[in-house]
Amino acid sequence: MKRIYIAAYHQSKFGKLMGMSVPEILRRAVTEVCAEIKVEPAAIDVGSVGAICNISLNQQGLLAGLVADIPGLAGKPIESVENACASGGQAVLSVIQKLQIGWGDTGIAIGYEKMRDAEGKMDGKLVGQALGYFSHPAEREGKVYIFPHLFAEVMECYLKVHGIPERHLAQIAVAEYANARHNEYAQMRNVELTVEQAMQIGGINRYIVDGLPLKTYDCSQISDGYAALILATEEGLAKLGVAKKDSVEIAGYAQATDPLKKSGRDVLRPAGAIKAMKSAYEMAGVRPDDVKVAEIHDCFTVMGALGTEVLGKAEYGKGAQYWVDGKASVDGECGINTSGGLIAKGHPIGATGVAMLGWCAWQLLGKVPKPLQVKGANVAATFNIGGPICASVCTVLKY
C-alpha cells in the first residue's frame, strides 16, 4: 500500500454562492486549491467529484466532464460519485483508490453543493423532496420533510433508550455555534446561541415533526459551498514541491454500508459505521484514545452524540454526556467539530466529507484560528455518513 498525503486544501465560505454556476463552482474549486501550493491543474493526474443535488436542483449531470473542461485536466481519469451525504468522503476514497492502483501520483477530490437560488433563497419543500430521494421508498409515506422526520425518530429513540434530556443534545448545538464564531468559513458565524434559546420553542425554533423532539436548532444548515483536497503519494509530493512537514497522511480509511431502510436495524449501534471506523483505526495503527481532533457528521444533534460513540470516544449511550462534560471542546479530551460542524459551519452536502478532512488537516498543521486550535494534536479522525446512518466513510489522519 502506498502512503497517501493531503498536499493542499481549500474551501469556499459555506452559506450562499448566489448566482455562481456549477461550471464556475468546479473551476474555482480546482484552481483555488491548486493555488494553495502554486501548481497548475495540469499537475493533477486523477480526480473525483461528489455532489447529490446536481441533477435535482441544478439540472446538471456528468460533473466529471465539467472538471475535464478545466485546462490541463482533459483526458485524465476523473469520475463523479454519489453516496448521499457521504459523497464527499467517497470522492476522497475514489481518488485514493486511483492512486493506489497506479493511475497517477497526484489527485484531486472535489465536493460541492448548490442548494439555493441566485438570490440566495432556499425552497424548503423542493430541497426536502430532493433529499428525500436518498431514503428508502417504504419510509417516505406521510413525511413532509423526510430526513428531519427520520432523524427525529432516531432522536426520540436515543433519548428514551438512554434516558437523557433534550437539553443534553441542545448543548451540542450550543458548543458548535460557539466554535463557528471563530471560523471565517462558517455559515452561522454571526449567530450566538444559548442552551435556553436552543430549548425555547418560539420564533424560528420549532418542533419539526409533531410529537417528536427534533427542533430547528437541532438541525444542520441548508448550504451552498465547495471544498477540494489535493492528495498525493510520496512521489506525488515531490512532483508538487510539497514537503512532508507541510502535509498530513491519510493513514487509515474505510467505507461500509448498512441497509437503507432504517426500520428493522439498531440505528443506535450502526454496524457499518462502527465497522468502518474500526477498520480505519486498524489500518492507521491507532486507538480511539490517540485521537485528539475529530470531525463527525452531525446532520442533527443526535448524530453528534452517536458519532462520538462511533469514534470510540464515548461508551454506548454516553455520547451526549461527553459533550455536556466539556470533553469535546477545544481544550477537552478530544476537540470534536471545532469547525462548527454541520450544525453551524454548514452542510453543503457534497462538500461535507471533503471539508471534514480538510479541517482536520489544518488542525494537525496548526492552521486553524487560535481559539479553535487543539494543542499538540497529531492524530485526527473523520466520520461522514449518507442516508439514515446508511453509508459511512471513516478516515484517520496522522502528522
Image (spheres, rainbow, N blue to C red):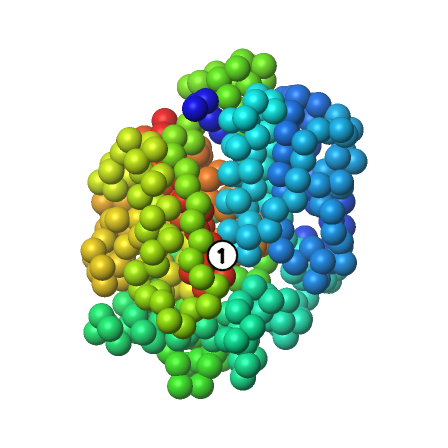
- Work out whether 215 lies above or below 10: below
The quadrant of the picture occupied by the N terminus is top left
Where is residue 182? Give x, y as percent.
44, 47
At x 76%, y 40%, the residue is: 65
Disc 1 is placed on an element classified as strand
Where is residue 156? Give x, y as percent.
34, 76
Residue at numbered disc 1: 386
- In the picture, measured across the screen, residue 312 lies left or right of residue 99, that is left
Q: Do we see residue 236 in this rendering? A: yes
At x 33%, y 32%, the residue is: 284
Q: Residue furthest bottom?
A: 211
The local crowd at label 1, few if under 14, some if 14 to 19, many if 20 or more residues have their Cα within 10 Å, is many
Of 24 and 394, nearer the camera is 394
Residue 23: quadrant of the picture:
top right
- In the picture, measured across the screen, residue 228 lies left or right of residue 257, that is right
Where is residue 220? Give x, y as percent.
48, 62
